[in-house]
Amino acid sequence: MQVAIIKQLAETHTTEALRAAEDAILNEQTPAIEVEGKDEGEQLTHVLAAIEIHHDMDKHGIDFRTALRNYSQRVRNSIS
């Protein structure tokens, strides 16, 4: 998981475009948007993280930086 890639995806793509990319990856197809990652698993992780950030922004009315920070903190907490 690379936060810079997640940030770029969340900043430049809509939730709909990210969901379409998720579906494409899950169906072993090439997404319409460029998703960096060493393999399909990492690409899917990046897309799902960006979707979660969008969801957090919409649900809680928070800005992008706060949503990204919240996501990163949840990941760190789940690892420790």
Image (cartoon, rainbow, N blue to C red):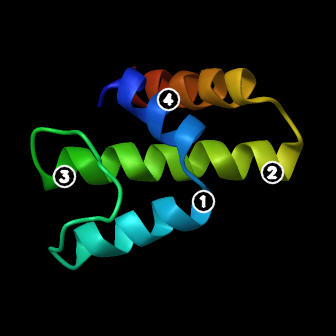
Earlier along the polypeptide chain: callout 2 or callout 4? 4
User: Dot 3, crowdedness within 10 Å: few (<14), some or many (≥20)?
Assistant: few
Q: Secondary structure at mark 2?
A: helix
* Residue 22 falls in image quadrant: bottom left
In this view, the mark in front (1 or 3): 1
Image height check: is 4 above or below 24? above
Earlier along the polypeptide chain: callout 2 or callout 3? 3
Earlier along the polypeptide chain: callout 2 or callout 1? 1
Is there a contact, CB below 8 Å, between mark 2 and mark 1? Answer: yes
User: Dot 1, crowdedness within 10 Å: few (<14), some or many (≥20)?
Assistant: some
- Amino acid type at circle 1 is Thr
- Amino acid type at circle 3 is Gly
Q: Residue furthest left?
A: 39
- Tag 3 residue: 41
Look at the image and tell me in which quarter the C terminus lies. top left
For marks 1 and 4, give the CA distance. 13 Å
Q: Which mark is residue 43?
A: none
For marks 2 and 3, give the CA distance. 26 Å
- On screen, residue 13 versus residue 55, left or right, reads left
- Tag 1 residue: 15
Q: Position of residue 71 (x, y in %)?
A: 57, 32
Q: Secondary structure at mark 3?
A: helix
Earlier along the polypeptide chain: callout 1 or callout 4? 4
Q: Which mark is residue 7?
A: 4
For marks 2 and 4, give the CA distance. 16 Å
- On screen, residue 32 versus residue 54, left or right, reads left
Look at the image and tell me in which quarter the N terminus lies. top left
In this view, the mark in front (2 or 1): 1
Q: Secondary structure at mark 4?
A: helix
Which residue sits at x=69%, y=52%? 55
